[in-house]
Image: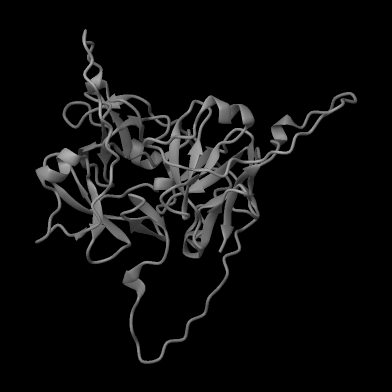
Amino acid sequence: MTFKVLWFVTALSLIEFGRTERSLDKYNCNRNKPCTQYFRDCGQYYFAYDASDSKFVQCDEWGGCFVMPCALGTVWSSEAYTCVHGNSDNNRVTTTTTAATTTTKFVPDQGKYNCLNKKPCTQYFRDRGQYYFAYDASNSKFVQCDEWGGCFVMPCAPGTVWSSEAYTCIWGNADSNEVTTTTTTTTTTKFFPDLGKYNCDRNKPCTQYFRDRGQYYFAYDASNSKFVQCNEWGGCFVMPCAPGTVWSSEAYTCIHGDSDADEVTTEATTTTTTKFVPDLGKYNCYNKKPCTQDFRDRGQYYFAHEASKYIYIRCDKWGGCYIMPCWLGTVWDSAAYKCVRR
């Protein structure tokens, strides 16, 4: 069965639906299923699982209900609307003596698989905590396993491809589009994002026109401290920028700046400005997290990822750590403090 999946990029941050708040309640696939038409109309397909925070409930567009595992070392967060790094409630056991812990860095298998004659959904990989794999037919899809050995071919979001190194879909060109012909004429059109301002009520930008152009992010008409994000099915979400950043349609991301919500006229004030110099180190969200109080006090919430220049790390004000993709054709530049065109 093919599931509808929301963008990995969306994973992280607090999400506000246009008219309806996202449900933070806990569900299961037995007597308390959340896979209703109401939630589908709201665009919500993922929910907290009532038995364990190391799993979550996933619905498909037909009302199917599935209990899915988070990756090793992560737990479900309804606020972030994704699995985030943390300790499972299953592991919270009080003992008198604590055994010594050895931390082994998770290194995903780089092989390519399918769900027909080369399934990766074995006990060996489950014991290692790996549930996602490259698909051997196309890099625009990936193979997802569940804890019982079920195997599913899942699509990456438009404009993204699977990366085993990053262990997620990142921006790139799908190999399924590489077709050999006798004579090929290629016209490359530079992507110029629409600069209009929108909302998720009466002025939604989530149309087929913009999806065909590959634009899923837009300025929010009520505040530059937020932006509008669309998914591939026309769902509309108002998303917050990280503290200290504002949306820039030209940069097509949140950049360091002052929110218009803070523009209040006051009497003359003497201001001392200290130039922000971002840290240039490389980090991850596993054993080298940059989301510390020290960096938050300095106002830095974005960092280079040690695994790839096509992704970066975004922290929230509570220390949450999220891996974010750069937009198609861009790479992370710590000095510029944003993704820039190559």
Residue 1 showing in the rendered view: no
Q: Position of residue 272 (x, y in %)?
A: 81, 30
Q: 267 above or below 214? A: above
Write down the quadrant of residue 129 in the picture: top left
Write down the quadrant of residue 55 in the picture: top left
Left-right relation of 35 to 146? right
Q: Nearer the viewer, residue 104 or 2?
A: 104
Q: Position of residue 100 (x, y in %)?
A: 24, 22
Left-right relation of 339 to 98? right
Q: Residue furthest right?
A: 268
Q: Position of residue 288 (x, y in %)?
A: 42, 36
Residue 50 showing in the rendered view: yes
- Tell me the quadrant of the picture where the C terminus can be found: bottom right
Q: Position of residue 252 (x, y in %)?
A: 59, 53
Left-right relation of 13 to 5? right
Which residue is located at x 19 percent, y 32 percent? Answer: 29
Q: 115 above or below 201? A: below
Which residue is located at x 24 percent, y 60 percent? Answer: 135
Which residue is located at x 43 percent, y 53 percent? Answer: 308
Q: Nearer the viewer, residue 213 or 70?
A: 70
Q: Residue furthest top?
A: 96
Which residue is located at x 21 percent, y 11 percent? Answer: 97
Q: Nearer the viewer, residue 163 or 147?
A: 163
Q: Residue furthest bottom?
A: 182
According to the image, what is the colour scheme of the structure? one colour
Tally of marks:
0
